[in-house]
Amino acid sequence: MANGRFELDDLGRVLVPSNPVPWGERVVYVLRRTDKEGQRYKSSLWAVPAAGGEAVRLTAGEHGDHLPMPGNDAIYFASDRERGDQVWCLRRDGGEATRVTSLGHGSIGGGALSPDGKTLVLVFTAASSEVALATERVARPGGDDGPAAFDGPAREGKFEELPALPVMRVYARPHTRTDGAGWESGFVAHLWLVDVATGNARRLTSGPAHHGAPAWGPGGAYIVATRTAVPGWDRDPTRNEVVRVDLAGAVTVMSRPDGYVETLAVDGRGRVAYTHAAPDDMWGAKNALLGVIDDRGARLLGSELDRPVGDLALDDLAGHAFVAWPPLWDGEGVIVTVTDGPGARLCRLGLDGTHRWLSEPARCHAMPVATPAGLVTLRGSPSEFAELARGEERLTHHNDELATDVAPRRPEEVWVEVDGVKVHGWYLSPRGRASAAPGILYIHGGPHANYGARLFFEMQWLADQGFAVTWTNPRGSHGFGEHYNACVDPHWGDIDSRDQLALVEHMAARPEVDGERIGVTGGSYGGFMTLYLAAHTRRFRAAVADRGLYDWALDAAGGDFGHATPELLDCNLPWCDPSGMQPYSLLRVAHQVEIPLLVMHGDLDLRCDRTQAQALYETLLRKGVPTALCLFPEENHGMSRGGRLDRRKERMRQIAAWFRRYL
């Protein structure tokens, strides 16, 4: 119902387009929607003319259709509609989709159709994270050429049905689990070739190394991909390599850059462009660059921008931040998305070292693709839902009715000076409130992320609930220069807290805000900072700490990359040197908290293990501080953006209720 304000039920009405691919004169894309009865998300394929026109739905049903791979006469895509993740085909002339593959249990993590349209290359992991073979296997250490592996024959072709859970899991390498995926199954992500006419599949690569990001070479003669075959990769996931794989499975290393290749693209001359993350940079404190492999060898471009290549602009709806998207070759260079301030901008990087901005900084442009009509992107802003656009022309209008009903407002951009440095933030005033309102400070995770120029449902809804809201990009945030981003490590709170407090005072000085009633909240690193500010200052009246990292020792034991924590902090494991991590941990000062503090956490969070939330809660209880522990069953670290709909709504409801009670 149109009432000019955000309601929690409107969260289920948001439609999210993503993953556009050109298909002749049209762009095919994935549209995510909410299955309101099951509180889960479904997706289907849609198409819209790149020159403008009506968008039409291509695939029907309540499924998870994704990874569109277009050919001349058909489009192939992955879907969960039968027996897990399989490839399906939809003919250009219409009709029902038909299943192509019978890969058995597993997941498809990427793919591409050959230039002649006859063969698919897929990244396929032959068992899901919660399914493994219930057979006897013996763990053995990995050699210098890769991670630990399992003895036993490789299973190829069609897989037999597997039990719901394994009898046992055996690990012989540091990395054992990943937030959002669960415990590792022991299977490896390999490249597979699929004959689209017959559905016959064969595994192209072998061995203990994971492969990913496949792209066809000129004429379909070979495949370029990434491989985690660098010695010791599992302990140091900041390095991998680019390989060339011929159709018989022979592998040649094209480049072993000093760093990590995330995604890549190959042009008609066989040149490779890729996004390159710096080595020994577990937290992403340094700017990612554009890598190129051509007849001059491998080199990096874009350092003069002092901005990261990639989309790091967070939101809680579109979810395009941190999604690996291949660079786009064009006649003048390579087009990439660059996080510049709070915007995600398009930039063309020339092979001669020049650059040219292709979009304005006030919006975010994600996932660029080239069409005969021009460049098409997913475009959004702080007051606009994400839609496909070509330049200034919107191509899709999936959220127009919702936008009319809720009337999103553009927040004000705020700049304050701290220590001679300009610090960025956003501010949204309370809507429809006559008296001075309480204020809420939001702190993003990372810390090396960015509150971007995108629509935030949570901030808009809280403002419509009568709160003034400030969300900030303090030092430690990407998009404002590498020094700005990296200067907080490893001493979180020393510098960044001054930036947060300066933006709080800016909000508190506004006439519509009651400066004595200010709350603070944030998730992950934002949860860390929430506890830090509550323990070290008396500026806030109440706090909500969400999925936070509160103790490095507990994180080393329970986090999904806790094994790397000593390298991050340059110390030993806490049970070997109890004093090494203690200065960085906050549970030791949690007894200093005097304000009501609500603790929230996902029950299956493997990034910041829930033990940390329980420890904080018990500490506050013992102190006698008003507190409560909200645990969300089945939810991982990313619940606020991708969790079950009813739990996402309940999380926001609890935050608002806590601040109403104590502010």
Image (cartoon, grey):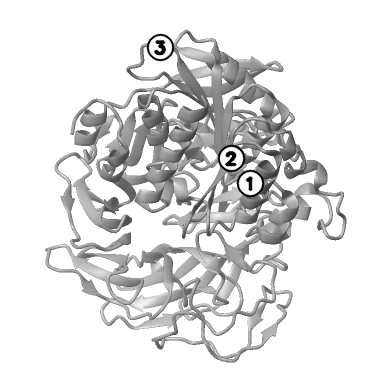
Q: In terms of image quadrants, where is residue 194?
A: bottom left
Q: Position of residue 628 (x, y in %)?
A: 56, 43
Report how far apart the C-alphas of labels 1 and 2 lie in the structure: 7 Å
In front of the other: 246 or 104: 104
Q: Nearer the viewer, residue 412 or 481?
A: 412
Name the N-terminal-most of marks 3 and 1: 3
N-terminal of the two: label 1 or label 2? 1
Residue at the (69%, 15%) spot, across then down: 420
- The residue depicted at 48 percent of the width and 59 percent of the height is 270
Tell me the residue that label 2 is attached to. 627
Provide the secondary structure element on which disc 1 rests. helix
Q: Is residue 486 above or below residue 608?
A: above
Q: From the viewer's perspective, is the residue at label 3 or at label 2 nearer?
A: 2
**Real-space Cα distance between discs 3 and 1?**
34 Å
Q: Secondary structure at mark 2?
A: strand
Residue receiving disc 3: 435
Q: What residue is drawn where x is 63% and y is 18%? A: 502
Amino acid marked by disc 2:
Thr
Whole-percent x, y for residue 274 in the image: 53, 52
Mark before the other along the chain sequence, 3 or 2: 3
Find disc 1 in the rendering and name its residue: 617
Q: Is residue 13 left or right of residue 353?
A: left
Res. 72 visible in picture: yes
